[in-house]
Amino acid sequence: MSINRNSFIEAFAPSTPGLNLIFLNHLGAPTKLLTDVPTIEMLSDKHAKIAFIEYCKSHPLVKDLVLSPQYRKTNILVQFLDGSEMNFSLITKMVRKTMLCLNIPAIRKSAFINEFGMLVPKKEYHFEYMVLKCQFSKDPLSDRYKNYFAGFEFNERAEIFKYMQTRFNLIFNTLEDLYKPKANMLLAIMIGLRGEKKNSLFQMFLRSFEVAYFRLFGSLIKREVYIKVTPKYNPELNSAENKRSAGHAM
């Protein structure tokens, strides 16, 4: 029940540069995402989200879409003709405790196309995203990411090490020290974030107001949006249908 999922992700991955969608929790080959992560998280914006929805609507294997708006992100459940599903989270900004955590312009400017045709962030930004998720959610980094980052060459790990120390003014000895949630580490990260202009008290106040408004407004309307995809011509499906028709005729 995963043939449609495999076909979709293989076609979708090399389309991400044109859609301006950046994988945030990628781990290599596109199909590996299906077993590695329950939700594919991508950096997006308003135009990229619309482009992604249109892409799904035009794909011959997609049956339905379910959109769940969240604060600064949209969760999209893609349902396929064979009954399988895929979860996507399109993130415009990563906000934790009313603080803006990621340098979105820098991530977009330095994003590149990897050997699989996927638009991905530089390694230090990918590492930063996963560590921030780990520390704020208080969930240890999974082994698949530990093994992934452990496979980097010395110079790559040194570049990540330097970036994290400079950005957050952290004191740590190895990258592995950041894999386990710690109160003192989270406090140091929050202090580093508070030192940035985009996380001034005024900006944090505005975001707290936005969050409250979003939750209030969201509770008064239907949160989920269902999109029924119009059936499209699919050579494989039509061929199978023709064979069935011929069998009945005989």
Image (cartoon, rainbow, N blue to C red):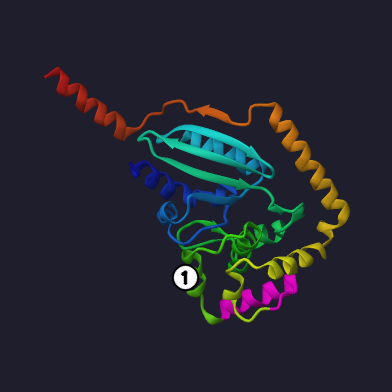
Above-or-below relation of 61 to 139: above
Q: Which residue is drawn at the image coordinates 60% and 75% (left, top)?
A: 177
Q: Which residue is drawn at the image coordinates 70% and 56% (left, top)?
A: 104
Q: Residue furthest left?
A: 250
Above-or-below relation of 58 to 176: above
Label 1 sits on what residue type? Asn
Q: Percent x, y for residue 125?
A: 63, 64
Above-or-below relation of 232 to 191: above
Quadrant of the rendered image containing residue 85: top left
Q: Percent x, y for residue 171?
A: 70, 78
Left or right: where 182 falls relative to 147: right
Left or right: where 20 falls relative to 84: right
Q: Percent x, y for residue 5?
A: 40, 44
Q: Which residue is mark 1?
A: 147
Crowding around mark 1 (Cα neighbors within 10 Å: few <14, some 14 to 19, many 20+) is few
Give the overall secondary structure of the magenta segment: helix
Q: Which residue is drawn at the image coordinates 60% and 46% (left, top)?
A: 90
Left or right: where 136 falls relative to 28: right
Q: Quadrant of the N terminus?
A: top left
Q: Residue furthest front?
A: 183
Please tell me which residue lies in front, 142 or 54: 142
The reply to whether the magenta stretch includes residue 144 is: no
Give, as a single range, the part of the protein colored magenta. Answer: 155-171
Q: Quadrant of the C terminus?
A: top left
Quadrant of the rendered image containing residue 4: top left
Q: Which residue is drawn at the image coordinates 57% and 57% (left, top)?
A: 24
Q: Residue furthest right?
A: 202
Q: What number of labels is visible?
A: 1
Q: Percent x, y for residue 238?
A: 30, 29
